Image (spheres, grey):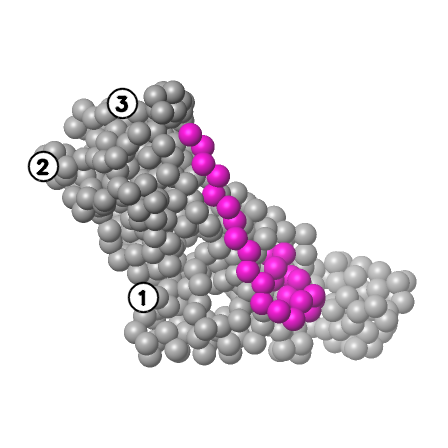
Amino acid sequence: MTINDIATLAGVSKSTVSRVLNNASNVNEKTRQLVLKVMKENNYVPSCMARALNKNKNNVIGLILPDVDSAFFGAIVHGINDVLKKTDYTILLCCTDNNPQDELHALYALQQQRVSGLFLTTSSSFATPKDAQLITDAVKDIKAPVVLIDRIFPNTSWDGVYSDNFSGAYSAVHTLIECGYRKIGAYISDMKLQIGQERYNGFQLAMSDANIPIDKKYLFLDDFSVSHKDIYDYTCQQIQKNNLPDAIFLSNRIITKGFFKAIFENGIVPGKDIHCIGFDYSDLIDILNIPYSYLERNLNLFGQTSAHLLLSRKNNESPVQRNYTIPATLHIHESLAKQHAKNADII
């Protein structure tokens, strides 16, 4: 069944059927309903690729992420979908595993698909200068609105939605200091990304503002993403060396998972022997009733903001670059709140 067949059955021209398919306004409503009725009766589904070739774009929006298993990105995708499902757009998801070559492959594939927009969490920070430039050029060749998600793309004018990593880390460590702790550590990965750098900078400044020297034996810093087993093994080693601090900042869910597994197996009681503040909530914390304070970001809002930003760009609502920051709200567990109140009374 082709568009010509639908035109013949409906007794209209091919161009009229095309206008109906493209939801054009210059079609008589009675004619529109007739064409739609014929299409339905004959189970006609228009070819998206054919329409894309005719219009030079289709109703598909690309989404390139480094990790599809992550709870962080999963929640953001839900937020994006909450907005796009109310439109004619659908999402084409690509995963790169932080591999620049896989990102290039995904970008070239999306070019071929003639996508109408792109959400991108880039792996360009892990690329060679040559590949980073190839990625930049490939994104530009999409020739559609681009919204960056959580990772910056240097020297570009694309819109973006980001986390307030610096302020979140600062407030977490500052709170630990206000509770009277001085032996404070930090486990931070992804230092090759601005995300990790900002969280470490927040930790550093909070310690500096309180005139507390940073003890390197309480630090775990890694340029790349780590597994919870990496953190588990490292923490067990530190426990054997008696190198655990009194309080610690954990920079993501994976680090938190590995850290808690290690201290539980070694008989260390969180909320008593050590206080922890980490980035992002995990339902395991409540299930296992772990005394844990955390920084929460509204990830659904993160995704929705990204989607609205891309749609507004498609509607040419703003000629200037727009960046939005999603705040991180600190939720203090009652065990740490009591310590905070106790220390305030002493002061």
Residue 190 against residue 282 in the figure, above or below = below
Residue 20 against residue 333 in the figure, above or below = below
Q: Which residue is mark 3?
A: 272
Amino acid type of the residue that numbered disc 2 sits on in the rendered structure? Lys
* Residue drawn at point x = 36 percent, y = 25 percent: 347
- 3D distance between C-alphas at marks 3 and 2: 20 Å
**How busy is the neighbourhood of tag 1: few (under 14 within 10 Å), some, or many (20 plus)?**
some
Q: How many marks?
A: 3
Q: Which residue is mark 1?
A: 126
Farthest residue in the front direction?
347
* Residue drawn at point x = 49 percent, y = 72 percent: 156
**Magenta span contains residue 311:** yes
The disc at residue 241 is 2
Do the CB atoms of the residues marked 3 and 1 lie less than 8 Å apart? no
Mark 3 / mark 1, whichever is N-terminal: 1
- 3D distance between C-alphas at marks 2 and 1: 33 Å
Residue 283 against residue 147 in the figure, above or below = above
